[in-house]
């Protein structure tokens, strides 16, 4: 039952298709996590062979792959034999630009929290705190397996979008930059490689930057990088000409976002720029992935924002929107200055 957007489908049938969307979502998650696509070749592979290699139940694996094939993720040729497709290749470990790690981003607790979406819609509070007594990132800090799964997924997304976003950044007039919440440093590396005149600081929690890709083995690049551990809710060491917050603000509510922005602002000068890299939700009824993702973010207290909501955030902390640069990804580069 593939989901179609055609207008001639009976409304009740269309709602039914949408309602059961979680079934294919979790099927893709399981296929990616188990590495099923790694064992399916273009000429066809019997399901019993895959089941043996992965120690899976053959009958249940067949039914899962039959569902996936109905969405063009695999193709069943003869009964019980499946061959690869471009979509299955996208969750195969050794293909370029694969999203295998990203496709099983949703950890056990995130899946349960999304099932608790009604609580967030009724109360405005995050589902994580109601379910587990703590926020999502505190929970992940205490559950290393889920935290590692989440980190791998974020790294997978970043690998695909970092080159595109870095290429869209106009940084000729700057000399020093700080990537706030920059994770392992993938985005900072892309920016510095494209802008050899820049020096950069990677700022994140100490346990995060301890796993950073710097030193990278490239002495000329490593000499231009400084790593600093800390919390973006407290203080950021040192001034910079430009600061980046990439995929940070959408994880937090307005109050927490203002705390983050205030912390960055304390390290800015009147000439500094802050570049917020996030999706800008389009108005009206236009489909956009940010709207899908937002329903998920709500359950841990985050949200996506439209242009007006970003402007309101900046105004609350004494900043102003200076420019917006769209990229070839889902994200935009939103420049803010001290008002």
Image: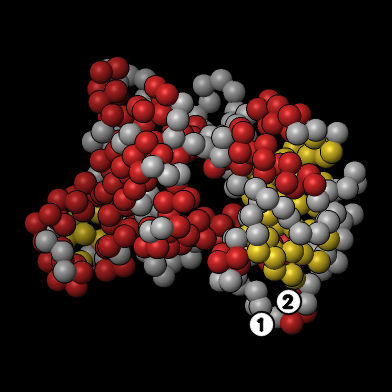
Disc 1/disc 2 C-alpha distance (Å): 7 Å
Say whether marks 1 and 2 touch (CB < 8 Å).
yes
Q: Which mark is residue 245?
A: none
Residue 253 place in picture, x, y as percent: 56, 35
Q: Residue at x 87, y 61 (%)?
A: 175
Q: Residue at x 25, y 22 (%)?
A: 13
For the residue pair 331 and 178, the one nearer the viewer reads as 178
Check the picture and name the quadrant holding the C terminus: top right
Q: Residue at x 81, y 66 (%)?
A: 199
Which residue matches tag 1? 217
Mark 2, Cα crowd under 10 Å, few <14 / some 14-19 / many 20+, is some
| Up-down relation of residue 247 to residue 254 (above or below) | below
Check the picture and name the quadrant holding the N terminus: top left
Position of 43 compared to 249: left or right? left
Label 2 sits on a secondary structure element that is: helix
Residue 20 place in picture, x, y as percent: 26, 33
| Residue positioned most to the left | 59
For the residue pair 100 and 249, the one nearer the viewer reads as 249
| Up-down relation of residue 210 to residue 83 (above or below) | below
Position of 30 compared to 301: left or right? left
Q: Quadrant of residue 255?
A: top right
Position of 152 compared to 163: left or right? left
Q: Residue at x 36, y 31 (%)?
A: 117
For the residue pair 90 and 136, the one nearer the viewer reads as 136
Which residue matches tag 2? 222
| Up-down relation of residue 111 to residue 51 (above or below) | above
Residue 307 place in picture, x, y as percent: 67, 29
Label 1 sits on a secondary structure element that is: loop
């Amino acid at each position: 039952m593939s989901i179609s957007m055609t207008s001639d489908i009976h409304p009740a049938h269309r709602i039914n298709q949408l309602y059961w969307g979680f079934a294919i979502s979790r099927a893709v998650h399981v296929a990616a996590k188990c590495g099923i696509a790694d064992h399916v070749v273009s000429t066809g592979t019997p399901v019993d062979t895959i089941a043996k290699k992965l120690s899976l139940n053959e009958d249940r694996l067949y039914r899962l792959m039959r569902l996936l094939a109905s969405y063009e993720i695999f193709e069943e040729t003869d009964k019980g034999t499946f061959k690869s497709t471009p979509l299955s290749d996208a969750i195969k470990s050794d293909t370029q630009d694969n999203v295998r790690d990203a496709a099983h981003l949703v950890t056990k607790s995130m899946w349960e929290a999304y099932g608790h979406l009604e609580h967030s819609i009724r109360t405005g509070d995050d589902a994580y705190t109601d379910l587990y007594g703590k926020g999502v990132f505190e929970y992940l800090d205490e559950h290393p397996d889920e935290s590692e799964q989440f980190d791998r997924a974020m790294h997978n997304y970043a690998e695909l979008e970092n080159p595109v976003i870095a290429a869209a950044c106009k940084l000729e007039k700057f000399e020093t930059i700080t990537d706030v919440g920059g994770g392992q440093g993938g985005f900072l590396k892309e920016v510095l490689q494209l802008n050899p005149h820049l020096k950069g600081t990677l700022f994140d929690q100490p346990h995060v930057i301890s796993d950073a890709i710097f030193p990278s083995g490239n002495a000329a690049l490593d000499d231009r990088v400084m790593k600093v551990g800390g919390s973006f809710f407290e203080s950021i060491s040192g001034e910079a000409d430009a600061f980046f917050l990439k995929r940070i603000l959408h994880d937090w509510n307005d109050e927490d976002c203002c705390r983050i922005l205030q912390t960055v602002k304390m390290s800015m000068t009147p000439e500094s720029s802050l570049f917020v890299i996030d999706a800008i939700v389009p108005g009206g009824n236009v489909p956009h992935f940010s709207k899908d993702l937002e329903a998920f973010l709500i359950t841990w207290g985050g949200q996506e924002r439209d242009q007006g909501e970003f402007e309101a955030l900046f105004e609350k902390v004494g900043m102003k929107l200076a420019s917006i640069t769209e990229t070839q990804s889902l994200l935009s580069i939103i420049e803010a200055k001290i008002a």
